[in-house]
Amino acid sequence: MNRRRRFLLACAALPWLGGIARADDGPTAVVRETITAVLAIAREAGPGDAGREAAFAVVRRHFDFESMSRRVLATHWAAATGAQRARFVTLFTELLTRTYWRKIANYRGAPVEFIDERVRDEGYATVSTRVDTDTVSIPVDYRLRHTAAGWQAYDVSIEQVSLVRNYRGSFQDIVRKDGLDGLLDQLAQKVAEVPRT
């Protein structure tokens, strides 16, 4: 994943590091309220480990990492053992939070503009937003599903590029070549190389 894509994904991840949204809030309210919260956390805590840990405690309430992991692994999820699935969810979640927290904590860019909310009867929704910088307008779509815990995100698309599809493409190649255990070993190594703060 190139540097610009990582930056855009980091910006997109902002809403899920807050934590004041309630279980009965609608999808746009969840996104809006958590954006406000994460910027407050970032201002007060900065990129240090304490801020990351405080933020991640809330991330788990608003981001369905297991659902995301299942979509990323696609057909390989069904073939995986329970232990492999659990290890993948843990490693993938850690990779995402370590990779993006410093960028998110240092974010001082333009506010998010809310464009549209589309809710489907099956309990799925898309919240479309836009982030305007000095040089570019970046569309960001959040895909959520309604769970017992309220609305939770399972994917983010930036400029119509899905985070799930992006990782799925990279990981599928590794699984085909080295198997699922090979992917897990590579993920563990990658996580170890990414600083916690």
Image: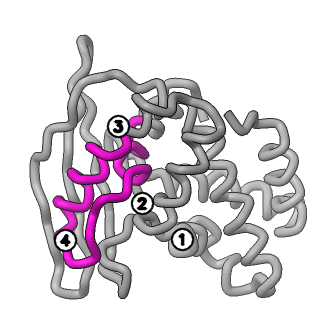
Residue at (44, 68) in percent of width and height: 61
* Contact (Cβ within 8 Å) of mark 4 with mark 1: no
Range covered by the magenta-colored residues: 11-38
Secondary element at tag 4: loop
Q: Earlier in the sequence, mark 4 or mark 1?
A: 4
Q: Earlier in the sequence, mark 3 or mark 1?
A: 3
Secondary element at tag 1: helix
Residue at (86, 67) in percent of width and height: 179
Residue wearing tag 3: 40
In the image, what residue type sits under mark 3?
Ala
Q: Earlier in the sequence, mark 2 or mark 1?
A: 1
> Camera-side residue: 178 or 30?
30
Residue 190 at x, y percent in the picture: 80, 44
Residue wearing tag 1: 71
Residue 178 at x, y percent in the picture: 89, 60
Picture quadrant of residue 79: bottom right
Residue at (16, 86) in percent of width and height: 121
In the image, what residue type sits under mark 1?
Arg
Residue 87 at x, y percent in the picture: 78, 70
Question: Is residue 30 inside the magenta stretch?
Answer: yes
- Horizontally, is 16 left or right of 78 in the view? left
Residue wearing tag 2: 155
Residue wearing tag 4: 25
In the image, what residue type sits under mark 4?
Asp
In the image, what residue type sits under mark 2?
Asp
Residue 21 at x, y percent in the picture: 27, 63
